[in-house]
Image (cartoon, rainbow, N blue to C red):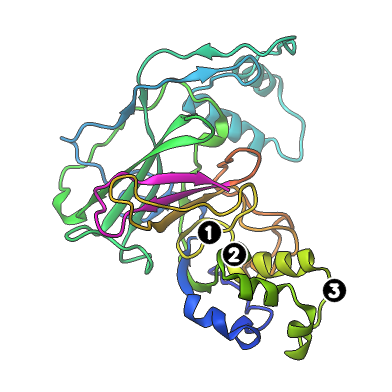
Amino acid sequence: MNSTPTTPLRPFDVTAVFPQLAALARTATRLYPRPGSPSPQESSIGGPLLWPADEPWPHCDGPHVVDGINPALSPADVRLERRIRAASRGRSLTPQERETLERIRPPRAYPHKLAVVPYEGSIAMLPVAQLYARDVPDLQTPGGADLLQVLWCPFDHPIMPKTALFWRSAATVTDILATPPEPPAMQFDGYLPEPCLLHPEQVTEYPDHLEVSKELQEQLGNRGVWQAAGVELDSDSVSWLEEFYDSELAGAPGWKVGGWPRWGATDPTPRLCPTCDSDMDALLTIATFEGDEGSSWLPHEEPADEPSIGFNHTAVQIGSGYAQQLYVCPTAPEHPHTELMH
């Protein structure tokens, strides 16, 4: 029987070593997407939305491009390919399965020169997340709203999908759109989330070492401070100490709402509202993986037969395995949100 995923106890209380961090603590809600069949009345990743039948479905007018390497596949073909791969795990493909997979991805020669071709037409957006405030403690909703819906265009704009946010009151939706439109093609199959139910858990996080004061940065890189608190360490290099703090003690990996961002592909940058210049709040982290091999953040759950390197139940892939962060203006949620990749 499956159990609810839970974050293991932290290796130690980091605020006992660095008391200055206590004032910087934030809560985040880890979402723990797991395969399921969500309904429009449930929080989900990649599930059906509680979308009003009389409200136009969002589309993206581009620009959209495809290259000579990655075929632009339809969501239906990607789902079919995934079903065949899952059903044939541990056995050889049947002739019919092989024929279907070759139809979806015909054999092709590697081009001498990468050709970027415009993809014409409006693209129906895909559901990414539906979050009910009742399920997600760190979801700060605008007045009158209790539901957040996140959709995206499954093409890069320019390095990741372009997202659209919709806040609504669930009680006002009485007639639900039964069959939303789907895009005729997607740039990458990693932009089609698998339907997942959520198992939210609230945790406490601290900022990346690059987001704290210079004085605290120096302490985080000082082996003597750690040793004085009785912390056993595997290395005394400054970079190792900073990396250990960032990866094991600061922010949780994986899909989450709120909290502190984790950095890696880029250094921290100001997150300012493009309309009013206010400091923006972290809304949602869309992650490729839930954690690195051996990470203390990997959840306890049964059955304990998951691969040791990050779970990817959603099938989402951002870049080469990164995460996409969405930020919103705390003073005016109607202001445009911003997106970052890390």
Secondary structure category for the residue under label 3: loop
Comparing labels 2 and 1, the label whose residue is closer to the camera: 2
Q: Mark 2 vs mark 1: which is more N-terminal? A: 2
- Front-most of 108 and 152? 152
Residue at the location (72% across, 64% down)? 243
Q: CA distance from mark 2 to mark 1?
A: 8 Å
Q: Which residue is mark 1?
A: 261
Disc 2 residue type (three-letter) = Asp
Is disc 1 surrounded by few (<14), some (14 to 19) or many (20+) residues within 10 Å?
Answer: many
Say if 240 sits above or below 337 in the image.
below
> Which stretch appears magenta?
323-342
User: Looking at the image, do the residues carrying marks 3 and 2 touch, with CB atoms under 8 Å apart?
Assistant: no
Residue on which the image places disc 3: 234
Q: Percent from the top left, x then y, of residue 113? A: 70, 10
In the figure, is residue 207 to the left or right of 89?
left
**Circle 2 SS class:** loop
For residue 110, above or below residue 141: above
Residue 208 is marked as: 2
